């Protein structure tokens, strides 16, 4: 069964316990899968079409040159405009596979089967597809909705503890966007989010994307933690995972609330957040390495003018321009807090 999504939202969404073949296209489809889930796919007797590619993925290889051989391969195998690409994998592969679908023959249909926590509650939804450039994350991409998203919970059974934790930060981001401090706190406390947490987050993201697909206003809130997060992730050479970097970005944004003149976050929540991020302390790049990525971020229309999402306890975040100097002091505070746990 597909979820009831708001009118105008062009992706069918199904949430299942385990993968089921009946949610695949009935004909003319090709598969692009993350090698890490190939055995799981097969263990559920899921079919593989004639044109199937199982690929190794990494953030460092989320680049245009990785994607081009896939397009060549599909052309050699006579994949045509009426084919549907089914992408099975985490956020790296869904971002790349969606972009490949948008490019091949000027756009073929695609379905996404997200397999990591982060992709199931965030990356798989909303049609943002991209690859990285030397200058920064996700700088070349397209808005291109999948026709269908199928979330099968059992994929998470094999996901590493580090990637589960990393994905949780995007869920915590959703709670803070809703101004729901109690939800954020319960997510910080739990090991694995419940299926109702996941359903709630998926529904919230669908609503936001449906109201603002091209990110002219409300959708920008989903960048909470990402302006600094992307810079930290790139400056660390992807040693810090995407979700972990978002967690650090969220902490900095919470610390900024006071200097932006809005209600400060409860110190208990800030302390708990810093404690959970403490294992990353030795990996955090210095400010001087992050700054060039911040200044090149695609969301900053003018240099020295950082577009920032500031969360507010018990309310939706505000969007504010802040100077790099103000952010630098929040970064220093974050660095100190994370290192002192
Ligand atoms: N398009 C969007 O709206 C959006 C939103 C958030 C993040 N993103 C992007 O998502 C990416 C991060 O996604 P991610 O955290 O899923 O990373 P990922 O795709 O690298 O997956 C994490 C790791 O887990 C493995 N894996 C995936 N599913 C597995 C499973 N079920 N069992 C075992 N291993 C599995 C992968 O091979 C990889 O090694 C970033 O590139 C980020 O920019 C996109």
Image: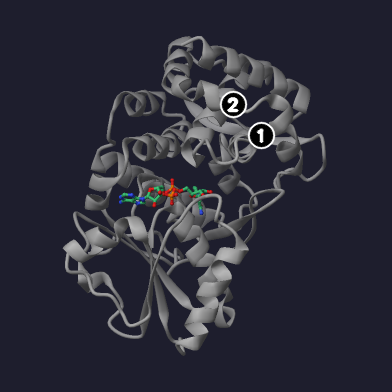
The answer to which quarter of the image holds residue 255 is top right
Q: Which residue sits at x=38%, y=40%?
A: 163
Callout 2: 10 Å neighbours few (<14), some, many (20+)? Answer: many
List x then y, in percent, for residue 319.
65, 35
Residue 267 image label: none
Circle 2 sits on which residue?
Answer: 253
Q: Left or right of 199: which side holds 278?
A: right
Calculate the distance from the C-alpha at mark 2 to the C-alpha at mark 1. 8 Å
Asked whether 315 or 93 is in front, the reply is 93
Q: Is residue 164 visible?
A: yes
Q: Residue at coordinates 63% horizontally, 37% vertically from top-left?
A: 227
Q: Quadrant of residue 336?
A: top right
Badge 1 crowding class, 10 Å Cα cut-off, few under 14, some 14 to 19, many 20 or more, is: many
- Residue 262 appears in view: no
User: With 291 as the anchor, is 41 left or right in this view?
Assistant: left
Q: Is mark 1 within 8 Å of ligand 1?
A: no
- Element carrying mark 1: strand
Label for residue 308? Answer: 1
**Picture coordinates of residue 145, whole percent (x, y):** 49, 66
Instruction: Determine contact: label 2, label 1, CB under 8 Å.
Output: yes
User: Please, is residue 236 above or below residue 79 in the view?
Assistant: above
The image position of residue 91, as x and y in percent, is 45, 53
């Amino acid at each position: 069964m597909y979820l009831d999504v708001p009118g105008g939202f062009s992706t069918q969404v199904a949430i299942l316990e385990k993968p089921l073949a009946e949610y695949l296209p009935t004909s003319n489809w090709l598969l692009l899968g993350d090698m890490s889930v190939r055995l799981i796919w097969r263990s559920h007797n899921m079919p593989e079409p004639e044109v199937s590619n199982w690929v190794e993925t990494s953030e460092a290889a989320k680049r245009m040159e990785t994607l081009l051989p896939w397009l060549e391969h599909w052309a050699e195998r006579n994949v045509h405009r009426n084919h549907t690409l089914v992408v099975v994998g985490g956020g790296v592969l869904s971002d790349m596979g969606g972009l490949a679908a948008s490019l091949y023959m000027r756009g073929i249909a695609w379905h996404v089967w997200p397999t990591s926590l982060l992709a199931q509650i965030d990356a798989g939804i909303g049609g943002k597809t991209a690859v990285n450039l030397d200058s920064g994350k996700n700088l070349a991409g397209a808005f291109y909705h999948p026709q269908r998203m199928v979330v099968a919970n059992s994929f998470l059974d094999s996901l590493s503890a580090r990637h589960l934790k990393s994905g949780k930060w995007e869920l915590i981001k959703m709670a803070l966007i809703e101004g729901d401090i109690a939800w954020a706190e319960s997510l910080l406390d739990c090991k694995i989010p419940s299926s109702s947490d996941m359903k709630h987050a998926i529904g919230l993201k669908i609503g936001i994307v449906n109201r603002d697909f091209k990110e002219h206003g409300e959708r920008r809130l989903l960048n909470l933690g990402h302006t600094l997060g992307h810079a930290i992730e790139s400056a660390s050479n992807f040693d810090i995972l995407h979700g972990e970097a978002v967690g650090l970005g969220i902490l900095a944004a919470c610390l900024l609330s006071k200097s932006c003149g809005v209600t400060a976050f409860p110190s208990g929540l800030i302390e708990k957040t810093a404690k959970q991020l403490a294992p990353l302390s030795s990996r955090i790049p210095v400010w001087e390495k992050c700054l060039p990525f911040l200044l090149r971020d695609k969301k900053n229309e003018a240099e020295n003018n950082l577009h920032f999402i500031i969360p507010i306890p018990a309310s939706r975040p505000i969007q504010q321009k802040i100077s790099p100097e103000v952010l630098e002091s929040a970064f220093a505070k974050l660095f100190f807090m994370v290192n002192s746990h």
